[in-house]
């Protein structure tokens, strides 16, 4: 019997047609969550362990932010051993709301550049 | 002495460079506020009196939604006599975050079509 190394059963992920625009925009409306999304977008492999994304908040707060992003359909998460891996659901979001994630990422980049 | 018919002095509007991405996304993350934005976008003259946008909420709640949109830089408001007129700050938003409002409006349209 093959065991899938990815354990996702305990984590809720909305199906494509359950991804809701207000919830998606709410998930993206926080600086820490935008930073998570930018980090995942910029990562070479398109995925990161939670602990690889360093945020200036407590571990509990960071976990909350990851959960909000997952439940809004922005990221997919699975466990590999003791590591929880996250990746952007870029293809799903592009199919559901074409151009939206791209324009938010561009806006976040512009915002970051303006502040630097 | 000329008097400007538009009274905006008592209403706060952020300057272009004060429009903040998380606040903008938060303002757009509510179904009623998305409906206001769509109504303004679809109106022939690009502006509407608050009472021309019929929402299934109390007047106080509607006023709150307009205020959130105004303070996030999404809409401009001014009073003409007893009417408070709102219009989308499309040009400002396009300059600040190119493509973002368009992609949100397209997403809202897709969401509406899917539900219909």
Image: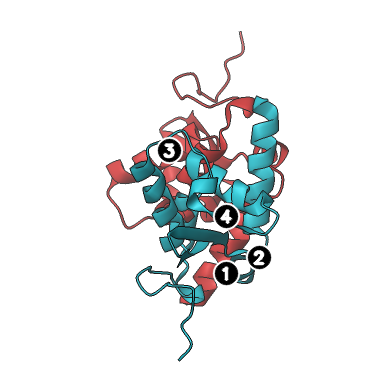
Chain colours: A cyan, B red
Q: What residue sits 57% from the left and 69% below the top?
A: B110
What residue occupies the far top of the structure in this picture? Answer: B1
- Tags 1 and 2 in contact by the CB under 8 Å rule? yes
Front-lying residue, A50 or A103:
A50
Q: Residues within 10 Å of mark 4 (few under 14, many from 20)?
A: many
What residue occupies the far bottom of the structure in this picture? Answer: A1
The Cα–Cα distance between marks 4 and 3, rounded to whole angstroms, is: 35 Å
Question: Pointer 4: what residue?
Answer: A48
Q: What residue sits 47% from the left and 75% below the top?
A: A15
Answer with mark 3 or mark 1, whichever residue precedes in sequence. Answer: 3
Q: Quadrant of residue B20?
A: top right
Query: Which structural element holds mark 2?
Result: loop
Can residue A70 be seen in this snapshot? yes
Q: Position of residue B59 (x, y in %)?
A: 30, 45
The Cα–Cα distance between marks 3 and 1, rounded to whole angstroms, is: 24 Å
- Tags 4 and 1 in contact by the CB under 8 Å rule? no
Q: Residues within 10 Å of mark 1 (few under 14, many from 20)?
A: some
Indicate the quadrant containing the C terminus of chain A: top left, top right, bottom left or bottom right. top right
Say which mark, if any, is on residue A98.
2
Answer with mark 2 or mark 4, whichever residue precedes in sequence. Answer: 4
Say which mark, if any, is on residue B68.
3
In the image, is residue B80 above or below residue B101? above
In the image, is residue A51 above or below residue A22? above
Indicate the quadrant containing the N terminus of chain A: top left, top right, bottom left or bottom right. bottom left
């Amino acid at each position: 019997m093959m065991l899938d190394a990815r354990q996702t059963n305990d984590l809720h992920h909305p199906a494509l047609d359950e991804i809701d625009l207000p919830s998606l925009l709410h998930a993206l409306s926080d600086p820490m969550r935008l930073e998570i999304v930018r980090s995942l977008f910029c990562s070479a492999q398109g995925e990161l362990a939670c602990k690889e994304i360093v945020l200036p908040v407590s571990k509990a707060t960071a976990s909350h932010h990851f959960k909000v992003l997952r439940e809004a359909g922005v990221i997919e998460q699975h466990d590999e051993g003791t590591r929880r891996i996250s990746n952007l659901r870029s293809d799903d979001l592009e199919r559901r709301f074409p151009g939206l994630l791209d324009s938010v990422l561009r806006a976040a980049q512009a915002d970051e550049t303006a502040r630097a």
